[in-house]
Image (cartoon, grey):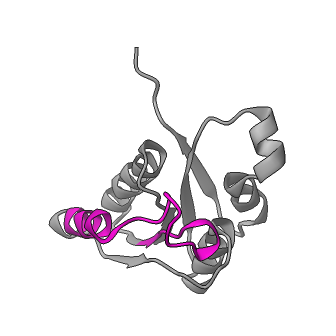
């Protein structure tokens, strides 16, 4: 089984990775982790720095999970990169994190999650960060 997970260095991104790790462990799956900035922008906060990616790679290796970490910079949207990786790897599952956004924020900026959910050719799990009291 192959699981593609969208990763950004945030609580939502880490929640998606944690869920993907759990599923990969249960099913002996390969993980394909995708991280990109907004349209390949290196300065975008969602573009993970090398320390974040090294820590993630170390975590996956320590757990014995077969994985690949990709950080494409071709200028496509995050949704397009996730969907392309899913198609290229014949993914069985896509995992993405969800963040809370206002209705106006969704209208103005669009939604990576929405595009992935609507356009994916395999099942998609959208993980929300648990609220703490």
| Above or below, comparing residue 55 to residue 132 in the picture | below
| Above or below, comparing residue 127 to residue 117 in the picture | above
Q: Is residue 100 left or right of residue 34?
A: right
Q: Is residue 87 magenta?
A: no
Judging depth in this view, the residue of 5 and 42 nearest the camera is 42
Which residue is painted at 75% across and 40% down in the image? 105
Judging depth in this view, the residue of 38 and 54 nearest the camera is 38
Q: Is residue 54 magenta?
A: yes
Q: Is residue 88 left or right of residue 7?
A: right
- Which image quarter: residue 31? bottom left
| Above or below, comparing residue 108 to residue 101 in the picture | below
**Quadrant containing the C terminus in the rendered view:** top left
Q: In x, y percent, where is residue 42?
A: 50, 72
Which residue is painted at 46% across and 60% down in the image? 7
Which residue is painted at 43% across and 48% down in the image? 10
Q: Residue furthest top?
A: 133
In this picture, which residue range is highlighted in magenta?
Answer: 32-60
């Amino acid at each position: 089984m192959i699981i593609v997970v969208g990763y950004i260095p945030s609580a939502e991104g880490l929640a998606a990775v944690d869920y993907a790790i759990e599923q990969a462990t249960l099913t002996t799956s390969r993980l394909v982790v995708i991280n990109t900035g907004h349209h390949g922008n290196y300065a975008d906060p969602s573009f993970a720095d090398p320390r974040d990616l090294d820590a993630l790679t170390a975590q996956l290796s320590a757990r014995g999970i077969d994985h690949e970490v990709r950080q494409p910079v071709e200028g496509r949207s995050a949704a397009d990169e996730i969907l392309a990786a899913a198609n290229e790897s014949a993914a069985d599952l896509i995992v993405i994190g969800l963040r809370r956004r206002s209705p106006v924020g969704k209208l103005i900026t669009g939604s990576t999650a929405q595009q992935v959910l609507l356009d994916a050719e395999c099942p998609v799990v959208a993980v929300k960060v648990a609220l703490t009291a």
